[in-house]
Structures are given as structure tokens and as C-alpha cells.
Amino acid sequence: MPELPEVETVRKGLEPYMVGHMIVQANIRREGLRWPFPENMVARLIGKRVERLRRRSKYILCDLDSGETLLIHLGMSGRMTISAPDKTKDMVGDFHHLHPALEKHDHVVIDIDNGARITFNDARRFGAMDLLDTKTATQHKLLASIGPEPLGNSFDENYFVAAIKGKNTPIKSALLDQRIVAGLGNIYVCEALWRTGISPLSKAGKLSKIRATSLVPAIRAVLNDAIAAGGSSLKDYRQADGELGYFQHSFAAYGREDEPCKTPDCMGQIKRVVQSGRSSFYCSKCQH
DNA sequence: CTTGGGTCCTGTGCGC
DNA sequence: TGCGCACAGGACCCAA
């Protein structure tokens, strides 16, 4: 589900409740999600202070003062929700703050020393949690081969043109390939391609240098726009604080099958095609 | 090496 | 109202 902007929105939402605070209780309500949870995960979390929250691609990395990092991936349907004492209430109200009853698919519950409760809910269980050595976390198997952050300095035109050079695969697939660029998913790939007028069906390696180059700022822009809007709230996705993101109202291609293309004077309509099992939305009139 | 397909899971919405 | 099917924001793993 969540792509880079949604994960970044969740990270930012968790930050004020977790960073500098101690985990006072943790509970797991099943043995694992996509994979089993690491051994003694609960004991390795309790009593640890959160030093910072980082993001790498679609992963959240929660650095603890024990030298370990809690790695979180939301998969397709994962949500992190915060239940916290209402700051507008008096201290007595805070102290007796009651958290809402746990719901179906609330798999991991983490209580913080400030009274906040962080709940990881994931119906489809494609999400994951692991504990890594902080010093070597980014070299972990799951993170080692992930490509550059699209909003970072190492993702530039030269890198990108070289990365897709000679690729026989459609540009859609290349952009979904996390080894080429980190954090993109089905929505933002469709949106970036629409912004550049490139068809998702085009072979990556056959794009002209100019057109390939144009994807770099388009990817950056669509991600920045989505982050500024608080991500996209589709189906059950919400920001960590329960607020909805608004970027779904700005989609030009994704989910707009049979609707008019938003390119000025185009008059085409958005089509849906399936590429390696995923829907691609694009305008066949202005995307080539 | 690259590339495509199957797979893990639950929930929802649609046509019949 | 029920049933079966298609589809959903990811990405690992393996076969060719």
C-alpha cells in the first residue's frame, strides 16, 4: 500500500510521540507477519529509548539506545495508529488515558512513557518487523540492494540514464524496481510517467536521453507534492495521527480509467492496462 | 546476469 | 441475500 510519501508521512507522524521517549510495554498478538518476528522482540523493545526515526525507501528505521534498530515495513495494508492523551485535557485526564479497544489485525502494540500507544494493524500481513544492529542496518539483506533515494542527491540524471541503459523491460517495471530507485510504487510511477508524457509500455532502455532525463525531476516533484499533501488516503490508509492524506484528489492517472486526461487540450481518456500483474493507468493520446 | 510469473494474505465491490 | 471472481498501495523467490 504505502509508497514513499505515505511512509514518510507515517514517520513524521510518529516522530513527536516516539523520539526521546522510552518504550514501556510491547505486545505481539501473533508470531509474525510476512516473516516471524525476531527472537525475543518484545524484551528487546521494552525499556529502550527511541533515539531517532529514519526512513529508507518504504522502510521505517527506529533507532533504539540499545544499539538495535526496529525495522518496520507496512507492506500493502499496514497502518500505524497513535492513541495519545489529549493535550488539551488536564493532567488527571492524561494519567488515566484509556486507549481504544484493540481491533482485528492489530498485531503489534507499543506503549510509550508519555502515555501514547502505537498500534501496527495489517490485514493482509505483507508487512514486516525486524530488529537489526544499528551500525550495519543499511547493509542488511533487505536494504543492501535498494537504489538511491529519489529525493536525495545521488539520484540524478546521469545516474538514472545509466541505470536504465540497455534495459529491455518496460519503463513501468524499471521504476517499480527498488534497485533502480527507492520508494516508488504503482501510484507514483503512474503519476510520474503521466507528467513526462512517457507511456508505461515504453522499453526503458529505448527512451531518448532527454525523455529519460525528464523523469528525474518529475519523480521528485510528484513525491514532494504527495508528501506536502500528507500522502494519499486510499481505502483504509490514514496518517499515523488518524488524519487523512489528500494527494489522492490530485491523481492525474492512477485510478482514473475512462476519465478525461488532465493534460491541457489533450481530450484523451485514461486507459488501464495490466503489466506484470499490476494495473497501469495512462493516456494513450499524450503518453508515448 | 535479466526478466516474468507465482505467491503470500484479507477485504471489498461488482455481476449474476 | 449469497456466491464467485477480480482486484488492491509490495516485494521476495525461483524458473527460464
Image (cartoon, coloured by chain):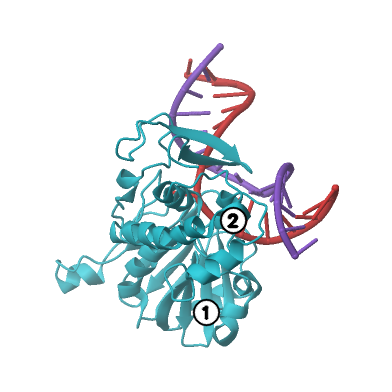
Chain colours: A cyan, B purple, C red
Secondary structure beneath dot 2 equals helix
Q: On what subunit does the disc labeled 1 rest?
A: A
Q: Quadrant of residue A167?
A: bottom right
Q: Residue at the spot x=54%, y=80% of the render?
A: A44
**In this rendering, position of residue A235 left or right of residue C4:** left
Q: Residue at x 54, y 73 (%)?
A: A42
Q: Of the residues shown, which amino acid type is indicated by label 1?
A: Thr
Res A267 → quadrant = top left
Is residue A80 something one can see in this rendering?
Answer: no
Of A219 and B16, the residue lying toward us: A219
The location of residue A165, given as percent across then percent down, is: 62, 62
Q: CA distance from mark 1 to mark 2?
A: 30 Å
A25 or A200: which is nearer to us?
A200
In the image, what residue occupies the spot 47% across and 39% down? A281
Residue at disc 1, secondary structure: strand
Q: Which residue is mark 1?
A: A69
Badge 2 local density, few (<14 within 10 Å), some, or many (20+)? many
Q: Which mark is residue A174?
A: 2
Residue A197 in sight from this viewpoint = yes
On screen, residue A39 above or below A109: below
Direction from residue A153 to residue B16 in the image, left or right: right
Query: What residue is rendered at 40% in x and 81% in y?
Result: A52
